[in-house]
Structures are given as C-alpha cells and as structure tokens.
Image (cartoon, grey):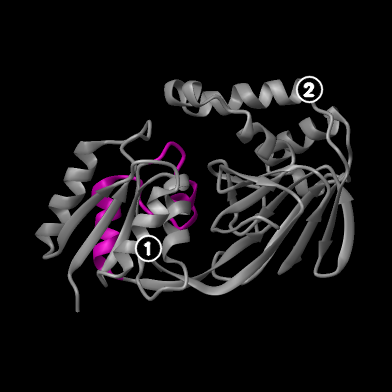
Amino acid sequence: MSFSIVIISNPASRSFSPAKIGRAEQLLRQRGFRTEVWFTEHHDHARVLADNAIRKKPYCIIAAGGDGTINEVINGMAMSDTPLGILPLGTTNVFAREISLPLDIDGAVGRLAVGKVRDISLGKVITPMQERYFCLMAGIGFDAKTVHDVSGTLKKLSGEGAYIWSGIKNVLSYAPEELFFSADGKLYTGYTAIIGKARRYGGDFMATPDADIAEPTLRLCLLTERSRHALLSFAYGIFRGTHLRDANVVYVRASDIIAQGHAHIQLDGDYFGLTPCRLITVRNALRLMQ
C-alpha cells in the first residue's frame, strides 16, 4: 500500500496560505505519510496535475483550495481508483460544507487520516464543443452570466464582493431569453436554472435541499417567470429557504436533462460556456475521503 500523498494547490488563489499547506504536510508526515505539493500555474492546470498524479498510485490526491480547484482536480481523476481528499482553503468551501468536513486544517487532516472512503456520483455537462464533470451544481442563466462578467482584478481584491457587484449589474440589465428544458423526457420552459448535484449553493444556502452527492440523480430548480421581480423573489427565497414554495419555480428530480436556447453555464462556481447542453449523472465516478 502506498503511503504517498500528492497535494495540489493553486498559489494564485486569493485564499492561498503557505502556512496552512505547511501545517497540513507536518500533520500528515506525523501520521507516516510522504507528501508532495504540486502547484498549479494556469487555469485548468489542476486537472492535468491530478491526471499525472494518478499514475504515481498515491494513497490519495488532496485538492487544497476552494471549489474551483476541487472541480479541476475531479476532472483529472474521475473514474480512477485513487481517492480524493479535501483541504478547504477556499473563500466559501461549499463542497467541504456539503460533506461536513472541518474547515480548519487540523480537523480536516484528522478526518483524512481516518481513511474513510465512499463512492459518489458526479454530474457531467456535455456540449457540442466540450464536456466536464461537476460535483456541486450547474447554473444556467442569471448566475452563470454573473460569473462570466466577474472582473478578475476585482475578484483578486475582494473575493465574494466581485460576484456581488457583478450580480447587481446583471440584475439592473436583466433581459433573459426563454430556455427549454427536457428532464427525463418531460418538457419545461423558463429563464434561469440551478441544476443541483448537491444540496448547497453559494455557501450554506440549500438551493436543491434533497440532492445527494451519492445518488446518480440531479435536481432541476427552474425559474419560469421572466420579470426582474420574479428573479429577485427567487434569489431571496433561496436565501430564506422558501423558494420551492414559489409558484414561479419548477423543482423536479431527473438523471438526464437537456437545456436548449442561448444562455451562459457555470459549473461549481466557475464559468464553463454556452448552451445548448446535456447534463447527466455518472454513478460511482469518484472515490471521496471524508
């Protein structure tokens, strides 16, 4: 059995902490593991590094960062036998919260050292040009346009503040096109959607509260009304946990969703591309340490 661990970290991240990485290495070595830290150098580099790390057959690969780093890593190691561990070093750490992982380094490493592994399913988005896995959610419409328009410079300076500012600007100019969804063959129309693979969205908000990362299913949460007022009510409802009682919201379970029309797509909080797309689930796609 290999006792080596590869830690993949993004040093350009606003929340990057050499001290926390060093502390994690110290704790892992005290438990008998050999560690290597591999740093990303550009967008999607974590996916390439994870793919390379699998060939070393390590005990596990640790994604040290936020949800964007985790997404890149899972896209490099999905369908492999190597388990994924998480060191929550992001701004909101939604996936870490989803699996109830301690947000401090000592607690997270302590959980990893127990070595409990379970298989989870992943979502997968397929477009005519590309495909990608996701573990939390896909956003189609308003939130994806907000992510698309975020200023990289402002994101470096203010983190979540950059998304809030982009969201405000997009609310003021909100004029969505109608979108068409097929969920396991049943047709719906709407203007913005969250397709949940997990419960949480943007922190501890439960946009798709009965989603389960272990199940090979998705939840389509679709706003069917075009007005700015409906959008704001939808957003406020997610904040309050009341959005599923909104008459303008469709909420269904499906394993195969097709989205048609013209809209932006985000995956796990990072921009992905444009519709049309197909969203499916892949059973037992990832071995997760938690």
Mark 1 packing: few (<14 Cα in 10 Å), some, or many (20+)? some
Q: Is residue 159 above or below residue 208?
A: above
Q: Which residue is mark 1?
A: 51
Mark 1 or mark 2: name the one nearer the start of the chain.
Answer: 1
- Residue 101 magenta: yes
Name the residue carrying label 2.
Answer: 173
Q: Residue at x 15, y 54 (%)?
A: 27
Q: Mark 1, mark 2: which one is toward the viewer?
A: 1
Q: Is 86 on the left-hand or right-hand side of 68?
A: left
Q: Dot 2, how many residues are within 10 Å of its Cα: few (below 14), some (14-19), or many (20+)?
A: few
Which residue sits furthest bottom? 1
Q: Along the line of sight, which residue is nearer the eye, 76 or 189?
A: 76
Highlighted magenta segment, given as a residue range: 90-115
- In this rendered view, identify the residue nearer to me: 78 or 283: 78
Residue 273, image quadrant: top right
Residue 136 locus on image (x, y percent): 56, 54
> Does 256 appear above or below 175?
below
Residue at image position (28%, 62%) is 112
Give the residue at x 51% y 71%: 285
